[in-house]
Every structure is written in structure tokens, then in C-alpha cells.
Image (spheres, helix red, strand yellow):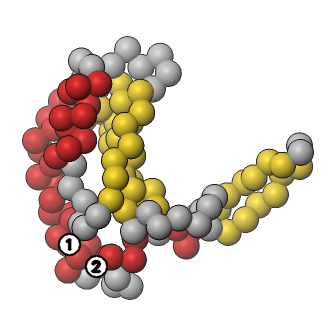
Amino acid sequence: MKYMLLIYEDEQVYGPDKNGPAVQEIVAKHMAFNKELGSARVGGAGLKATSAATTVRTSKGAKTVHDGPFAETKEQLGGYYLIDVPDLDAAITIAKKLPVLQDGSIEIRPLLGGA
């Protein structure tokens, strides 16, 4: 079964330096996590900051384009992993190991037709 692991964190914890120590620390942790995942990892990537985001919103049939994320929240979507594991319990086990720099959450979502 394929699952998307969506990583939500407060992007402010990384600071303004895109190559600073906090970024280097989390990248090293993700490299080790990738190695541990092995063949269960189907794909994944980090995302640029929400300041680089563009949202297309539909309201009453009209489409509008906005800078930034869909909604203001404390945590932003920062990246994802796509995994292929036997069941939700296996996905939860992996999600619990996924590194975040400070506080955050991992949303586990099965893919449609993900078997």
C-alpha cells in the first residue's frame, strides 16, 4: 500500500539562512532516514519556503491566483515522502521515525489506488 507522509513544521525554526546550521542538521538527519527506509521509499522531496508558493483558488467557479500558501497556519508543509509498505501500522512506524527539527507533525495519507 502506498502512503504519503506529509511533513509539517514551523519553517521559521530554520532561520533566514538557507544553508545555515539548522538546515544542515535536518538534511543530515533526512539522509540517514532515507538510507534506513531502503526500498520502502518510492519518492519524496523537500519544498521551498511558503514565500515561494503560489495558490490558485476557486470560489463560486471563479479562479484567482494568490502569492503564498492557501492558509496562514503555525506549521507549513515542508516536504513529503512517498512510501510503499504493507499496511497503515507500518506507515505509522516509519512516520514516528521521520526527523523534524523541533515540533511538527507528520500526516499519513493513503494514495487512491495505492495498493
Quarter location, residue 75: bottom left
Type of the residue with mark 1: Gln
Disc 2/disc 1 C-alpha distance (Å): 6 Å
Query: Which type of secondary structure does the marked residue at label 2 adopt?
Result: loop
Q: In this view, does 54 lie to the left or right of 59?
A: left
Lower sequence index among marks 2 and 1? 2
Residue 92 percent across, percent down from the top left: 24, 34
Q: Is residue 67 left or right of residue 25?
A: right
Q: Is the C-beta separation of discs 2 and 1 under 8 Å?
A: yes
Type of the residue with mark 2: Asn
Residue under the image location 39 percent in, 77 percent down: 12
Label 1, on which residue? Answer: 24
Label 2, on which residue? Answer: 19
Quarter occupied by the N terminus: top left
| Nearer to the camera, 31 or 60 | 60
Residue 39 percent across, percent down from the top left: 18, 30
Residue 83 percent across, percent down from the top left: 29, 32
Residue under the image location 53 percent in, 64 percent down: 73
Residue 5 percent across, percent down from the top left: 35, 41
Query: Which type of secondary structure does the marked residue at label 1 adopt?
Result: helix
